[in-house]
Image (tube, helix red, strand yellow):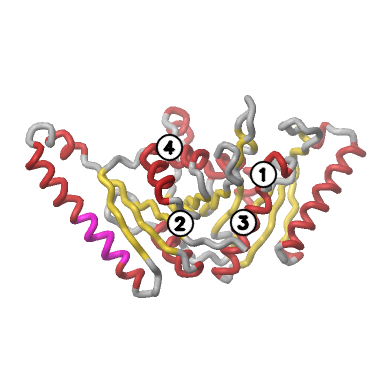
């Protein structure tokens, strides 16, 4: 079973408690992992004023950061009372994708946790939000928190993809279930398994076709193979029959609707890249984030392919 040792919480620049704080506290407590909280803070006015009087503004900036450090340390002190090992840091920098990724690569966490918020489609079209870019480029597992009605999740949905050869996704389905089962066991949560059948792999090429366009015998053979693979995974991770779900339709729509209807606290799903012009395999994670029915846990493949 996977062991989470280091969790990184990316806190908002505003000194306010958010759902990600609650979820990070709950997961660190349940798994015994070290929790490190970092906040990126940058005030443009102070930076510009520093060009005129560097020493005075350096002092003002340090005073400003000290207030933020004190606030963050207070939150950590409360969490330490429950036996969690917590460290904090405030960084004078914008919370840009470059700065976030640099910090993640330096700290090397097993899991990154961050709040996420709904972004209208028009805004996404003209300005790609950091969360969407982080989803693709974060080198480790990423938990995007929409709410924390239950800080310690009670129901977890592992959404796998059996439409691609495992060699293309670098064992991603097993990694999804490994992380999901670890979290479920640590939190005492129900673990459900979902596969949405619509696309089927018919060759070694990294592409898929709708099963409805296939010959009936070939379609039945593909569905039987997916059913067998689904059962093998479910048995391997001891998932009850009542918690196994095979559905059909557009994956991102079905996952979002199913998670909402059954009040899941977290959906665990994967994202991966392959080499070649097609780039992204299964943008289901990105599409689900567009309509985020609950918090998402994004699982990355083994290092070796591009993240």
The mark that comes first in sequence, 1 or 3, is: 1
Residue at image x 39%, y 37%? 98
Q: Cα distance, mark 3 to mark 4?
A: 27 Å
Residue 286, image x and y in percent? 55, 40
* 301 shown above or below 194: above
Q: Can residue 231 be seen in this snapshot?
A: yes
Left or right of 107, for residue 261? right
Is residue 303 depicted above or below 192 in this figure?
above
Question: Which mark sits nearer the N-terminus, 3 or 4?
Answer: 4
Say whether disc 2 or disc 3 marks the residue closer to the N-terminus: 2
Identify the secondary structure beneath mark 4: loop
- Count residues near mark 3 (Cα–Cα under 10 Å), then give few for <14, some for 14-19, many for 20+: few
For label 4, the residue is 129
Q: Alpha carbon of mark 1 to alpha carbon of mark 3: how far?
A: 31 Å
Residue 29, above or below 221: below
Element on which disc 1 rests = loop
Magenta region includes residue 247 = no
């Amino acid at each position: 079973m996977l062991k989470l040792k280091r969790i990184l919480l990316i806190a908002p620049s505003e000194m306010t408690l958010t759902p990600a704080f609650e979820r990070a506290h709950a997961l660190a407590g349940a798994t015994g992992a070290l929790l490190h909280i970092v906040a990126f803070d940058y005030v443009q006015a102070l930076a510009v004023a520093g060009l005129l009087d560097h020493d005075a503004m350096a002092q003002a900036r340090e005073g400003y950061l000290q207030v933020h450090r004190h606030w963050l340390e207070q939150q950590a002190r409360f969490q330490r009372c429950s036996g969690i090992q917590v460290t904090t840091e405030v960084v004078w920098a914008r919370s840009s994708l470059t700065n976030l990724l640099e910090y993640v690569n330096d700290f090397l966490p097993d899991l990154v946790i961050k709040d996420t918020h709904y972004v209208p489609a028009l805004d996404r079209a003209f300005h790609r939000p950091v969360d969407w870019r982080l989803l693709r480029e974060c080198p480790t597992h990423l938990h995007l928190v929409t709410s924390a009605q239950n800080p310690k999740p009670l129901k977890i949905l592992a959404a796998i993809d059996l439409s691609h050869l495992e060699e293309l996704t670098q064992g991603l389905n097993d990694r999804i279930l490994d992380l999901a089962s670890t979290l479920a066991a640590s939190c005492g949560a129900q673990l459900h398994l979902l596969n949405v059948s619509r696309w089927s792999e018919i060759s070694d090429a990294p592409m898929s076709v709708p099963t409805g366009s296939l010959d009936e015998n070939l379609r039945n053979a593909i569905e039987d193979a997916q059913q067998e693979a689904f059962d093998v995974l479910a048995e391997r991770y001891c998932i009850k029959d009542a918690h196994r779900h095979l559905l059909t339709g557009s994956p991102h729509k079905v996952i979002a609707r199913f998670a909402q209807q059954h009040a899941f606290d977290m959906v665990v799903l994967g994202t991966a890249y392959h080499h070649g012009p097609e780039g992204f395999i299964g943008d289901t994670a990105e599409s689900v984030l567009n309509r985020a029915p609950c918090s998402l846990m994004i699982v990355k493949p083994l290092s070796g392919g591009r993240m």
